[in-house]
Amino acid sequence: MSAQDILVLAEVNQDAVADITFELLGGARELAGATGGQVVAVLLGHDVAKHAESLSAADRLIVIDDEQLADFSPAPYLAVLESLVGSEGPRAVLAGSTTIGLDVAPMLGAKLNAPVVNACQQVAVEGDLLKITAAICGGKVLAEVEVSASPAVLLILPGSFRPTEETGAATVESRPSPVELHRGAVTFEKMILPAPGDVDITQQDVLVAVGRGIQQEDNMKVAEELAAVLGGELAASRPIIDQGWLPTTRQVGKSGMIVKPKCFIALGVSGAPEHVEGMKDSELIIAVNTDPGAPIFDVADYGVVADLLDVAPALTEAIK
Amino acid sequence: MNIAVVVRQVPDLVEPLEIDASGAALDVDEVEFLINETDDHALEQALLLKESGGGSITVVAIDFGQVDDVLYTAAAKGADRIVKIPYDDDDRPPRPAEAAAMIAEAVKDIDAELVLVGSSAHDELEGVLAPLLALKLELPYLGVIRGVKPGEGGSVTAFKEFPGAAMAQMNVKLPAVLGILAADQPPRYVPVSRIRAAMKSTEFEEKETAAAVPEPNVTVLRMHHPEPSGRAEMLTGSEDEVAARLAEILKEKGVVQ
Amino acid sequence: MTTLQTDPGMEFLAQRVDGDPAFGCIQCGTCAASCPLGAAMEYPPRQLILQARSGNLDKILSSPSLWMCVGCHTCSSRCPRGIELADDLWPALRDRAMQEGIQPPAELQETFQNIFKYGNSLGESARKRLDWAKELDVPLRDLSKEPTAVEVLWLVCDYPSYYPRNQVVTRDFARILTALGVRWGVLGNKEKAVGDCDRLFGEEGLFEMLVENNKKLFDKHQFEKIVTLDTHSYRALEHFYPRYGAEYPVEHYTTFLADRLDLLKPLLTKPVKATVTYHDNCCIGRRAGIFDQPRMLLEAIPGVKLVEMARNRENALCCGGGGGGMWLDGHIVEHGGQRLSDQRVRQAAEVGAEVLAVSCPLELSRFEDSTKVAGLENKLLVRDIIELLAESMDLGEKEK
């Protein structure tokens, strides 16, 4: 262990290592290259040693196996990480800006009296400093910040780092929990999976996604018609789901689906980071938005600054 | 159930986001504020819990931006008490850790069984308020929640989002702090006449806090608007011209035959 | 809410609550039979009164049909007892429903919130109020920056300020006013929604707030009259604002220009060869009796052949956009109603019109959408009278 190590909080979702973890490992490799330290992955859970192989891009993998960690709950995770990070003393802790990371990392930073930076997109090492670019205000403002204290706790936006494809030979250290864990006030009861029956948007070749720019439920038909002529399906960003205009199974991005269709058409989607993380790897991205500064144009292959209510019907006609 | 709800102001993304003269912060005088969306959901969740099981709602806010509008709206929707925490820096919104310290002091006096706060806010840079508040209050925390139901024996059932449209059903023994992403239903509409009536009848309780405010340990060097990456090829022309070009592209790429 | 006491609709409700059935409705059913959406309503106008009298107010308030009136005023204009159903009864019932916590359809909630927060129904930034004038080629007097006495205070209003299709018309009107030598000014970023439709939607508190703010704003400026392209704003200023003690001389552009036809006619030099039919919108037509002036303007344009639809003037079919209808299409269709604009464009095509001329800003986008639905795209053009005038004056921006 060294004060130059980069510690990565690994995540497992529905029995598979989460995509964000490979991205964090990719980012950590570059940072460790600059600091001269090692990449230390930490995996918390119960019966999770089977995932060790897929995390071998790290130099060291610490697996903490405990029944109390079987399902996520913030308190035991925090207790283990506080102890572990305290004893490892790394330069930085990388956590995903995810349902788990957001619950744990801010408190971890506070407990360790360590700086916490939210919504990180880029991280660079400059001598004793870490220079970070964070995307706030829905990606409309970038904040350049620096931290000097170690460890820095960084919440990384999915899609920020290139996922590692390395398969190294991590030393696996399986350990019991460094602290005694109790069943706390927050307990897991069951996982509720989306009701089967609706379309699986992760399996579609063409998705037409709608965002706030659609304005009214009545306008959804414009997108439906376009999806129909393309033989695709509808998807949406979170505001549309919250309105109840489409079921949660159609949500793209954070807490929704990660989709990689052949063609993704974003209608009136501004491109907030939590949406972009779910669609950026689509093969062809076309974005239509009235705001020329909309971040969606940064991930799109083709962009049109216009009202989707004009362009989508015209495109439907053109394809017909 | 005695519920405390924390609400705060965030910059309105519809309006231009100007950077101030220092170059390292948003220009508060030029930015319009509105209620943080997830806090609005936290309030809605509190109203739904109160409607189903009775109790009282106290809304707590730091006095920043146009927070009075938000508080009168909360009162019109059915909040029973409004507690406002004085804050004297007009140029800079409180950092999450700072806000957590101040709000925790005010919430301690309320004796709430359940504290609801938006899971996150889009302007949070140095940490996240909701979990930090739980830490200050020394209460259990669970965040990124979509819906809360009253439970058995002093507990609630909370539904925490996971990727792939999955949700974990969690039992939370009270007292606790929950970070709300979305309420069981969208925030309700309250007619303006009720808000105007609330402006006349609602009294805010001012709560000075003497919380020790943690020193910042992150230095903001600069804020700026992202440069367009130039990645997208922008198509211009009439809607029909653009549509024709897009149809061509879709054909070239084999999306349509 | 002192205003509600003078409101016949609420008075009626108050009477009902007191058990006094003395209310003038004779249950003849003219209203329900005249209502273009009556067949789809659980409680068409006649039933509203019947049910309220029978003590079933709760049923009416919670029914989706409460949110299906588009404020066309056909019922009120034909009522033999002169009951102001559209202006007073529906809004009063909707207000009452919202006071009782009944949620209006989501699209309408969003619109209310936009008006409350941004001062316009589209939810656009107030700072973009003058974006329409970016490409304007005549001088514009922004009275919020340089207060000065003007002949015409032009209230540009929401759709003409922000909606791209309408902005073309807005610029054309600026050119026409300038060509006529009118000393005009606008309120720039200080302008806020006038709010007629809000009153019809039943958001009384929001309307009252808009009136108070607008009164303060207007009183800061010196002008002879207010002119607007927005028929709903016109109706609000002319009919409802005085109820709140805010009285201003106001004209819709059609009467303002028709009064200046002598000056205008010599400028109408370029023929606009087209068979044109005019759609009488509800706000200036049925509700204010302005039928002739729009036709006078059209007839003054060389080349225009004016034809009438079967339903014209007092009997014109509404476009479905008023009374909040602009934001209720989804709700109305969901509950069995039709988009009235889809029917209306077919009526225009039936009489051989090539151009459907309008004078209300909500209608351009409504009717253009409907021509697509009805398969009349490129066969029936939808144009504001202003655009036709500007084209004939060779000032026009949108030459189709």
Image (tube, coloured by chain):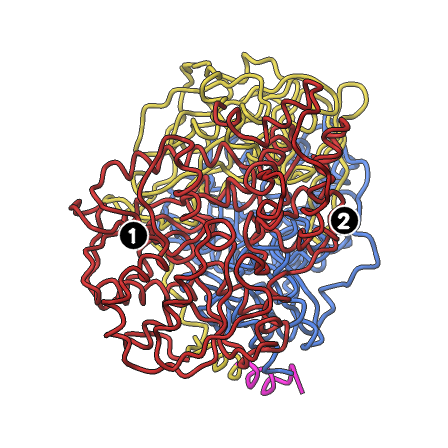
Kind of residue indicated by mark 1: Trp
Relative to B231, is A24 above or below?
A: above
Q: Which chain is red?
A: C
Residue A48's disc is 2
Q: Chain of mark 1?
A: C
Q: For residue A22, which quarter of the picture?
A: bottom right
Mark 1 neighbour class, 10 Å CA radius: few under 14, some 14 to 19, many 20 or more: many
Q: Residue at x 61, y 64 (%)?
A: A209
Q: Chain B: what color?
A: yellow
Residue C154's disc is 1
Left or right: C272 with respect to A183?
A: left
**Magenta residue check for A99:** no
The answer to whether residue A292 is visible is yes
* Label 1 – label 2 distance at C-alpha: 70 Å
Write the start and end of the magenta stretch as one range: B246-257
**Magenta residue check for B247:** yes
Q: Which chain is blue?
A: A
Q: Determine the secondary structure under disc 1.
A: strand
Q: Determine the secondary structure under disc 2.
A: loop
Q: Give C127 or C394, whichever is nearer the viewer.
A: C394
The answer to whether residue A40 is visible is no
Left or right: A122 with respect to A231?
A: left
